[in-house]
Image (cartoon, coloured by chain):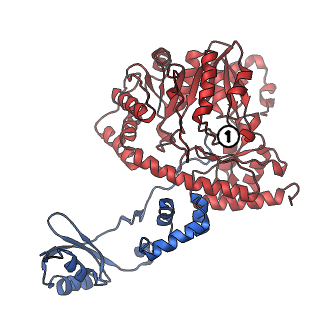
Amino acid sequence: MKQIFKALEGDARLTPEQISTMTGIPVDEVKKTIKKAEEDKTILKYKTVINWAKLGEEQVWALVEVKVTPQRNVGFDSIAERIYQFPEAHSVYLASGTYDLAVLVVGKTMQEVAIFVSEKLAPLEAVQGTVTHFILKKYKEDGEILEGGEGVKRLPVTP
Amino acid sequence: MHSSSSSQSKTTTHTYISDKVRTLPPSGIRRFFDLLASMEGVISLGVGEPDFVTPWHIREYAIYSLEKGYTMYTSNKGMPELREELAKYLYSQHGLDYNPEEEILITVGVSEGLDLALRAILNPGDEVIVPDPCYVAYPACVTLAGGVPVPVSTSEDNDFKITAKDIARQITPKTRAILFGYPANPTGAVLSREELLQIAELAKQHNLLIISDEVYGRLVYGVEHTCVASLPDMKERTILLNGFSKAYAMTGWRIGYAASGSEVIAAMTKIHQYTMLCAPIMSQMAAIEAIKAGDREVAGMVEDYDRRRRVMVKGLRDIGLPCFEPKGAFYAFPSIKTTGMTSEEFAEKLLKEEQVAVVPGSAFGNNGEGYIRCCYATSLKEIEEALRRIERFVHRHLKRPSG
């Protein structure tokens, strides 16, 4: 079954027929497995990785370190929930080390990100402090190298 | 079927080239290279190497070794650390117990190992049994080493597997060794442990060596690879050749190894020390990293190849080209007999009309006639596009459309 998901993770546009060919698992079983995985949220969604910079689209990303006071009974979960509900919070992780939550924030301008951090994130009751790192350049995202890469250099006919 | 007209125009007494080399046919694979060079938009299924680049950790380790100044000769036999790692690896993978001091030699790819093995064991006129079809270098290297290659036919009916029965028929008092590589280039055939056991028994009966090229040994799909040397009492009787090219995507590093009894390895080392001195140190460094920490990447590549293999084989069959299921390496070997063309004709026309490069089966021996070698170590997108083009081509040229 894992082969189905590995194939899909590499290319979300594969049809069940293609996946069946690639894995040797019957089409009906592939369809059933995918349907079940979509229902039980094993498959969360199908997304496209876009290099927005190529479209001239301005996007500002920041990694915000958030230090918080854990709450009785719920630990970090309830404060994490308060943060991840904001659409500006692209990703939220609990991390070990000098801070607790790592929040990836995305906005159209630096101003927009700064306002979100100073007016929404920092004032939350359990938040003790934040450190904001603006992302200067993206090299690799979701396992894909954005620019450059290595290309094919091998000769077309070899033994 | 190479033409010898050019050599006839000169007076043969004035050639600088030895008879042996002059009469050796050029590789049928290389011929296509010139044709291809001038064309654009070609999808090549004609390669014999991974489309992956060597995993980064391996390259990074080699870069680091260069920075640290490892640019000198190594011991003739290869760096002790690499030989020790290989001994450990062969033990853990196949239960083989090689002494890294005396029974393992680091070579410049399997290619050098093959040449050394043959030169070390053959007297002029000795016969070496090879499968037909087989990798182009086998018969050529036997000839160059002064031996006589004796092809044993294999066919699609038996999934291109060489059998003990067929080998037995070709054994003469001059037979010295059986040379093969499974998983096989060009067919993708794999021999089971039982099938290898029968061949091993035969080798013991007739006191023959087996030269086993296992460079595709890690690339098997749904079956186990059996190392010939790991069969009962076969370690001393086997010259195991292996390398890093295919499994670790390290073709350009030219690094491999030979393992056998100390007598054979000493003989091979003697030739190696006069002709090669040692394998390049940067490649040996990279190999150390590969063998110690490369398993995860190998597994990932094997999974990828397996997906492509299934797409390729199903695609070829859907087009109407019968194709037995290759269980190893990264080649499919479909029959093109329904088109009525020779494999060379097929490959040449396919390249000119549809810009898809494949290798004619005849390049690998008489029994390869009627087949083409399609390498699926290329992206799924390219495989799918190549299959569309082959389909167009085959339907255009079908001798008589079947029912």
Q: Quadrant of the C terminus of chain B?
A: bottom right
Residue A46 shows in this picture: no
What chain is tagged by disc 1? B
Above or below B282: residue A66? below
Question: Where residue B376 sits in the image (x, y, percent)?
Answer: 60, 51
Task: Classify residue B138 by image quadrant.
Answer: top right
Q: Which residue is mark 1?
A: B29
**Viewer-nearest residue: B336 or B286:** B336
Q: Colour of chain B?
A: red
Above or below B327: residue A148? below
* Neighbour tally class for label 1: few under 14, some 14-19, many 20 plus, Cα within 10 Å: many
The three-letter amino acid code for the residue at tag 1 is Ile
Task: Classify residue B315 by image quadrant.
Answer: bottom right
Task: Classify residue B382 by image quadrant.
Answer: bottom right
**Viewer-nearest residue: B359 or B201:** B201
**Viewer-nearest residue: B11 or B350:** B350
Residue A150 shows in this picture: yes
Chain letter for blue, please. Answer: A
**Viewer-nearest residue: B266 or A22:** A22
Q: Residue at x 56, y 26 (%)?
A: B114
The residue positioned farthest toward the right in the image shown: B400
Question: Where residue B75 sits in the image (x, y, percent)?
Answer: 37, 22
Q: Residue at x 50, y 61 (%)?
A: A1
